[in-house]
Amino acid sequence: MRKIKKFKIPVYSYEVLRKARKHKLDLAAIGLDSEQAVREHAAGLAAALEPAVVFEYLPPEDELAGRINGAFRQPLTAGILTLGKSFEEKLANPADETHKRLGRIAAQVFMQTAVGVTSDLAIREAEPEGFELGSAIYIAACPEPELPPQEATAVPLYENELIKTLFERLEASKIGVSFDTGAFSPRYSAVFALPWLSKKKKKSAAAAKR
């Protein structure tokens, strides 16, 4: 099990702006009438981030890996990540509904970025074994990520009991995260899995199509 606390993530403020426009937020009405203003706002929110993560490799024969993978027998990296208590406090009292929605969008972007950073670390373990990592499977997350259709998974909703088992296995308390009564503390946290995909099988499948 690996634990990393207060690591740095890149702040993709343009992605925050893009999603805000997609959801038709009236940014000008709250004084964010330029890209620069949105970048500064996103940077201000990001200043409160204290990301922390625990993650662990699960072999395909592991019971938990089987419950996450379903019919697919493949290894994976399971992780629990939080954006931190200070970030939760930063978003706790929005000035209005637009600020609230913008904060949620920023949390989505920061969460997916932090999971991406974790993937960059986990790939160092997967590549020497002849694997690459697939797209993250979000078992539970607050806020829920917005994923393109091609990245959606067929994974069913998970019962709280499985999430609690993962919390125990990964020792989530070491990064100060808990999951009680169906909610995370700190609020902006996620339980996720990174599937290990065999490069050999991928090459064989590609060759068969030729």
Image (tube, grey):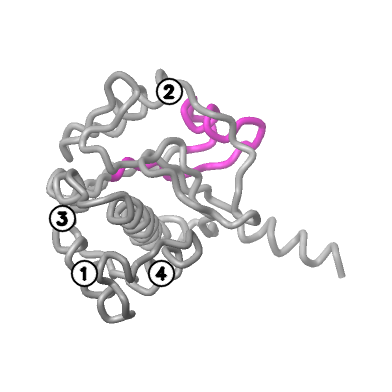
Residue under pointer 3: 6
Q: Amino acid at mark 3?
A: Lys
Q: Quadrant of residue 19?
A: bottom left
Q: Which numbered mark, 2 or 1, is in the foreground of this view?
A: 1
Residue at x 48%, y 59% (from the top left corner): 23
> Going by the image, does 209 lie left or right of 136?
right
Instruction: Give the residues drawn in magenta, as a range.
Output: 59-81
Residue 88 in sight from this viewpoint: no
Q: In the rendered view, tell whether residue 126 sits above or below residue 141.
A: below
> Going by the image, does 48 lie left or right of 155?
left
User: What is the C-alpha distance between the residues marked 4 and 2?
Assistant: 32 Å
Q: In the rendered view, tell whether residue 96 sits above or below residue 186.
A: below
Residue 11: x %, y % from top left: 28, 69
Residue 187: image tag:
none
Residue under pointer 4: 15
Element at label 3 = loop
- Few, some or many C-alpha atoms within 10 Å of disc 3 (few <14, some 14-19, many ≥20)? some
Q: Given contact means CB atoms under 8 Å apart, are the residues at marks 3 and 2 in contact?
A: no
- Few, some or many C-alpha atoms within 10 Å of disc 4 (few <14, some 14-19, many ≥20)? some
